[in-house]
Amino acid sequence: MSVPLPVLIVGAGIAGLATALGLRARGVDCLVTEAARELVPLGVGINVLPHGVRVLTELGIADALADVAIEPRAIEYRARDGRLVHSDPRGRHAGLPFPQLSIHRGNLQAALYRALLERHGADAVRTGARLVGLERRGDFVHAVFEDRRQGGTLRFDAEAVIGADGILSAVRALLRPGEGPPRGSGVLMYRGLTWAKPMLDGRTMVIAGVHERKAVLYPVRPPRRDGLQLLNWVAEIGERFGADAPVGDWNRPVDREAAAARFEGMRFDFADVPALIRAAEVCLSYPMADRDPIDAWVDGRIALVGDAAHPMYPIGANGSSQALLDAEAIAECIAARPRALPEALLDYQARRLAAANAVVLANRERGPEKLLQLADARLAAGPVPDGEPLLDAATIEAVTLGYRRIAGFEREALEAMASRPRLWPRGAGARSS
């Protein structure tokens, strides 16, 4: 029998690739498997908050993103009529030691993937391997995969298996066979990317409306030579405006004209939402969904990270950042106790489970976007004269600071971590391990 791998990671998304880079930088061998036959840049825009950028910086990835990401100056929360509720400075513009990054998800995944292959060789990732079974065999786990490239079956033994395979995780399904599908919110999100004239100053994120009818707009690339900039947009509609799509129906292409027609009223002086939808390079629909928090991500030598562990509503721009925190924590815990992996995985769970579950619940309560609900209630109560704030400063501070503390990117926490050394120095060349 072959010697088991130290760690097998299922899923080559952001969580899985960052976990692999963190483990290998700490001297722990691992293999990443991915169901897709080829890793191509899929998806739309995401935001990585300062605590997530800190992890990317330590992994030596942040510098590689400078040309394909935007460092937003602020998030502007705006009422349904476009009126400014609050401008919230972001990252270094708020005096934090790390920036926030707005980026195409595929560009971030590609940077992580490229770094893993350059540093550790093509054998670090096995694509076209779809997990179909896990079996505990004493001091290791036997994993069975469908070989989607050459046919037949692939089998691996590993001292630990990490499920990093998203909200529809096969690893989680094997651990919790009766759990069922994700939990729908009743909100359908249309998402896409459009080359357009820069919005406002070209470095601002805007969230306008209310939860059941809302637009989220932000640039994800610097302007190209013709002056146009790639703008990520999300247009959300609730059940009272149209039923949610079936939960689990992800990345579904939809007709641009039909989607735009549902948002004809969302025209602001800073952006024309239906025009952006009609001109989009890609137009997809997603159900806004999560799963109820669970009290265990670890079962012996099997653990969950990222969306496999704690899928959350895309509110507060926190999903990818929480996945990066998981990746860092599990790599550190395994490297600290490589001869006692079940205990190391429990250390990881103790470090991250309560914190991430708190973000899931905070996002269900709208997180920082609670400001929009409060502003909408203020407008519904009667006319607000021009120039009069919709919300007072104390209310705004309580909502925004409270969420930063729950999510883990308040100033004190980031400053305490800013002096940590890079695991991979700036400018270091590729190597194999």
Image (spheres, rainbow, N blue to C red):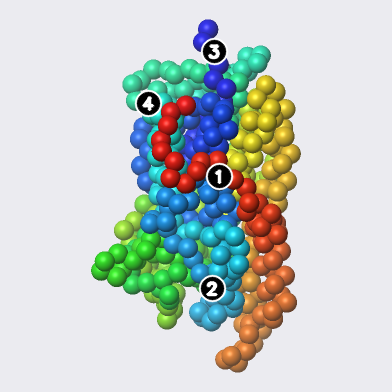
Asked if residue 154 is positioned above or below residue 211 in the image, the reply reads above
Instruction: Estimate the spatial distance between the alpha carbons at disc 2 and disc 4, rounded to whole Å.
Output: 45 Å
Q: Residues within 10 Å of mark 2 (few under 14, many from 20)?
A: many
| Residue that carries the numbered disc 1 in the rendered image | 422
**Residue at the location (38% across, 57% down)?**
67
Q: Amino acid at mark 2?
A: Glu
Mark closer to the chain start, 1 or 3: 3
Q: Which residue is mark 4?
A: 148
Under mark 1, the amino acid is: Arg
Calculate the distance from the C-alpha at mark 1 to the C-alpha at mark 2: 33 Å
Mark 2 or 4, nearer chain start: 2
Whole-percent x, y for residue 171 in the image: 57, 31
Q: Earlier in the sequence, mark 3 or mark 2?
A: 3
Q: Amino acid at mark 4?
A: Arg
At x 39% / y 56%, what residue is drawn? 68
Between the residue at mark 4 and the residue at mark 1, the CA separation in whole angstroms equals 37 Å
Question: Label 3, on which residue?
Answer: 3
- Density class for disc 1 (Cα within 10 Å; few <14, some 14-19, many ≥20) is some
